[in-house]
Image: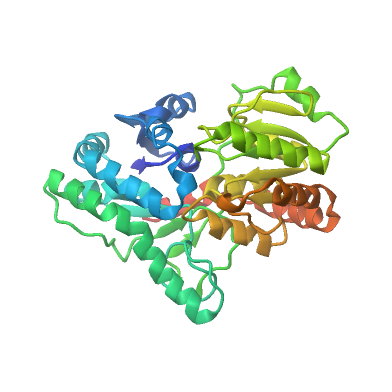
Amino acid sequence: MKIALIAFDTRGGVQPYLALALGLQRAGHDVRVVAPSDFAEMIAARGVDPRPLTGGIEAMLRASQGVAERGSLAVMRFSMRHLEERARAWARECLDACAGVDVIAAGIGGLVFGRAVATKLKVPMVEAHLHPLGPPTDAFPGVVSPWRGAFARRLGHRLTHAALWMPFKGAMKAAHASLGAPFSMGGDAHLPVLHGYSRHILPTAPEWGARHRVTGYWFLPAGDAWSPPPALEGFLASPQPVVAVGFGSMSSSDPGRTAELVMGAARRAGVRVVMLSGWGGLEARAHDDVMVADAIPHDWLYPRVRGVVHHGGAGTTGAALRAGVPAQVVPFMMDQPFWGHLVADLGVGPAPIPRRRLSEDRLARALEAMVRDDAMAARAAELGEKIRAEDGAAEAARVFEAL
C-alpha cells in the first residue's frame, strides 16, 4: 500500500509521524512524509521519502517574537494569519506530494491540507492524532478545557473541537478552493481514527466505539548516527542530581531572562541542569552546574536524569512518561495545560506551572519535589515500564492493513 503521512507541525509534532512511517515501512508499505522543509533532512536520514513543503516552521516561529508566551488566543490569531497566507500554495504542493497514493493520514495540522487533497484524489483520509480527539465524553477532559465533572467535561470536548478547528477553517476553505474540491471539515465515518498515545495514561472513551484506536505512542529512537559528547556523559555522571529543562519550539521574548530564572531555581534546589535551548525558549552559557545544548534526543537524555521540565507538548510529554522520570510541565498554550494536569493527576509530576506564573520560587519547589519525592519517582518508573512495553507504530500498521 502507498501511504502519505502529512505532518504540518513543529519538530515535536513531526517526529511521531516519522516514527509511524518507519512502523508502516517495516510492515511492508511504501510511505512518504509530507512536512515543512525544516524536516526533510531528518526524514531522509531515517530512510523515509521526504516530500518537503516550501517555507519552514522554525523561521516562522522565530519571527513570532515569543507569541507562545502570550497564550492560546495570540497563537490562534498568529496561526490564522500565516496559514491563510500560504494555504493555497501548500495545498497544491500537498497534492503533488500525494500523487499516486492509496491512502492519506494526518493529524490536526496535516488535515488542514490533507482533507482537500484526499477529496481531490478520491482516496481515504485516515485521522491519526497525537491527542484524544473524538466525540464528547466524560471519561476525561477536553484537550483545551481540562475541567472537572461529567457535564463540564462533555461541554469541554465541544469547546475543544471549536477551538482547535476555528483557526484553521479559513485555511481549509482556501485549500479546498485552490484544488477545486468541495469543502468539508468532516471525515469518513467508516474509517478508523488512530490515537498515538498510551492506554495507560488515558482511559478508552466508551462513546468512541471500536472506530477509535489508541495504539500506544509513536516514538522515534535516537538512531545510530547520534552519539553523546564525552562532556555530556561526564556532566551526567555527577553525584549531584541532574534535571533536563527545555521548552522545545516555544520561543521566548527574553530567552536570557528565562534561563536566569531556571538557573536560579536550580541553585536553590541543589540540582544541576542540562538546558535545551530549542527554538529560542532559553539562552544561557554553560558553567559548572549548567550544560547547554540546542537539542539532545529525548529517548537518550530523559532516562539519564532525575526529572524533566518541559512545555507540555504531546510528544515531549510522551517521551518524559516513557523515560519513567518525574516531570514538571510549564504549559504555554493550547493542549499543554491538558498534558500538564494529566501528569499531575497520574502522580508522576507536580502540578503544572503556567508559563505566565513561572517564578524562581515555584520552579525551585517543583525541582525539589522531583528529585526528593521517592513515591513520585516510583510511580513514574512503573508507568514508564508499561509504556515501553507498547509498540504503537506496529499496532497502527495493523490498523492500516485492515483498511
- Looking at the image, the residue that sits furthest to the right is 239
**Residue at 37% in and 58% down:** 164
Q: Position of residue 140 (x, y in %)?
A: 54, 70
The reply to whether residue 110 is visible in this rendering is no
Is 372 situated above or below 11? below
Is 311 situated above or below 63? below
- Judge from the rendering whether residue 155 lies leftward or rightward of residue 100; answer left or right: right
Scheme of colours in the image? rainbow
Name the quadrant of the C terminus.
bottom left
Residue 102: quadrant of the picture: top left
- Looking at the image, the residue that sits furthest to the left is 180
Name the quadrant of the N terminus.
top left
Q: Position of residue 293 (x, y in %)?
A: 63, 26
The one nearer the camera, 66 or 138, is 66
Is 328 situated above or below 228? below
Q: Position of residue 246 (x, y in %)?
A: 61, 38
**Residue at 75% in and 19% down:** 231
Q: Position of residue 394 (x, y in %)?
A: 53, 47
The one nearer the camera, 247 or 223, is 247
**Residue at 66% in and 23% down:** 285
